[in-house]
Image (cartoon, rainbow, N blue to C red):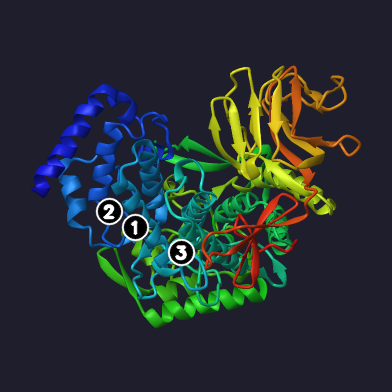
Amino acid sequence: MKNCFLFCVVALLGMSVSVRAVELSSLNWGQVCSGQMGAEWYGSAESQALADIVLSVQKTNGGWMKNDQLHKLTPSALATLQADRSGRSCLDNGATTMEMRFLAKVYQGCQVEKYRTAFGKGLQLIFNAEKANGGWSQYLPLSGNGSYHDYITFNDDLMTNVMKLLRDIQNNTGDFKDIVDETIRERCQTSFDKGLEVILNCQIDDNGTKSAWCAQHDPVDFLPTEGRPHEHPSISGCESAALLSFLMTIPNPSTELQEAITAGVTWLDAHKIEGKAIEDYINGDGLADRRIVDRAGSAIWGRFIQLGGEKANQVYTKFFNKLQASNKSRSYTYDGVVYTYKEYEIATTSYQEAKAYQPVFGIYSNDYAHLFYRFLYNYEDTPPVVDSKGVPVATSLMAGNRASYQYLGSWGLNVINVEYPAWKQRVDAQNDTTDATPYELSAVTYQSSESTTYTFQDGITVSNTSGKGYATGSSNTVKYSANVDYTITLPKSLSVEKITFYGYDNYDADAYLSQLNGVTYASTDYVFPAKVDGTATFVSHTIDLASAPATGSLNFKLGNKQCCLIMTLYGKTPTGVEKVIHVSPTAPVKWMHNGRVYIEKDGKTYHLGGQVANDF
């Protein structure tokens, strides 16, 4: 009976796909899960047939495995996944979080309970997988054998993917509206808080200076630790940039979080390789390759940046002792002779303390097992050296290593040049406003849209009558068209005394704020400069409304060209502190202060976003 059911599901999917085969097959699984089939598709018979396949391969512990294109499975691949439902679940490469987002979309489209039930099982897996001190590893159950699979993992956005999902569920809007009850949403907040706490605990103390993060951290002492044999304990330019981008989306950051972000950005900026970029090319042997090129205004970082000073001694001593304790050997055949190397020997003989704060590389190939855990410091080809056994060993990466793995990249550029200045401007304005509450209207606080009305957190909406739908620009900005009357509708009793427009002109001619709350401005008053050679200039304009505070709504209009903006409203409520009635006597107490909701639980006060409130 079960096989017959699955046959019918696959047949239905096949018949439905015949109508839209090009569109569905042109997407990868992540794109399908993120909504790129169009809102009207999720909840259709076709999407439900695919959702049934997703349910049929869900692990018994609630999650899914990674890298499976569930909308393109052959019958044999489907049967293999169904036979392995008792195996481990994975959170790496977007696994489980992607499937949960897909099921949430389908559930909202059709309201079929089994999809919400499966979503709940996935969420329980996330709760179960979180460590006691916060953070997640790649798999559940854990291996328990000291594998890097069990470490706190920032690699490939694992932590941020999980925490973004928890935040979206807790916000109870859009795809996640009422998909779980309030008790579970509160648990999402608690889980998010623990994740944020462990991120701060893992930030590496670089000999007295807070720096950034490694791709993996030890869940006991939080020190940076190794991954696969080419992923050394280090500071990661890639993972650190991604973490900082995420942290800057957390509204109303605590002083501790502000300091952590500033320290991370400062460290990355101080350790960039300036004026360089990475270029893909075909080398003289006809192979895909990458090389370092000069490029003005650019910069690169190592995926793995070697630690220095006493912190290096602490981390690498621990790493080498671990390799020595495992006592693993690697064999390599050269000129018909088999040579044996200890991993401890490979690592300790290649590590160079003098290379502190330089990018470090590694080779992970069973064809070159004698290079496992070898520290390499040359990106482009350099001649091998002969080791003590008489075997030539690499001193640099090979073309295949460079092309298949991103060892160097410009990950920190946008974080340093665009995202951080935008964040710093907003936070400084917030910190300077002691008697008003900031309300940010951005892609981060956006919740949903209905036609031409966009809803943001705290019940604030932006609408227009010109048919302009919601769209985003870079760095969490929202697009607003020129010569369109926009109306910001405010919650009852909120009085706005100041507004900041931060963002950029999206075209090659100057734009400007032409009208705000009935006041008209000249084209030279509040200018958003034109792009130059496709590069935007971010600017900030703050308008004081204290003499005539806006209540109920306020209007604005841009002149000449479209702009991508983050607006921050600074408002007060005349009622001061107000207790909000809650139904369950066991539920956390909610309070409203100056229009902002706070949650009091277990003796602590939290913002709705999950972080501890230090301003209440």
Q: Nearer the viewer, mark 2 or mark 3?
A: 2
User: Is residue 184 shown above or below 539?
Assistant: below
What's under tag 3, amino acid-wise?
A: Trp
Residue 377 at x, y percent in the picture: 55, 59
Which label's residue is closer to the chain start, 1 or 2? 2
Q: Label 2: which residue? A: 58
Q: Are marks 3 and 1 in contact (CB under 8 Å)?
A: no
User: Secondary structure under badge 2?
Assistant: loop
Q: Is residue 420 left or right of residue 345?
A: right
Measure the C-alpha gap from mark 3 to mark 1. 17 Å
x then y, percent, for residue 250 = 63, 52
Kindly identify the amino acid type of the residue bearing the numbered disc 1.
Lys
Residues tagged 1 and 2 counted as in contact (Cβ below 8 A): yes
Mark 2 or mark 3, which has the lower sequence index?
2
Residue 243 appears in view: yes
The percent position of residue 317, horizontal first and vertical second, equals 54, 79
Q: Quarter of the image holding residue 392? A: bottom left
Q: Residue at x 63, y 19 (%)?
A: 465
Q: 190 or 506: nearer the eye?
A: 190
Between the residue at mark 2 and the residue at mark 3, the CA separation in whole angstroms equals 19 Å
Q: In the image, which disc is placed on residue 488?
A: none
Q: Which mark is residue 121?
A: 1
> Label 3: which residue?
136
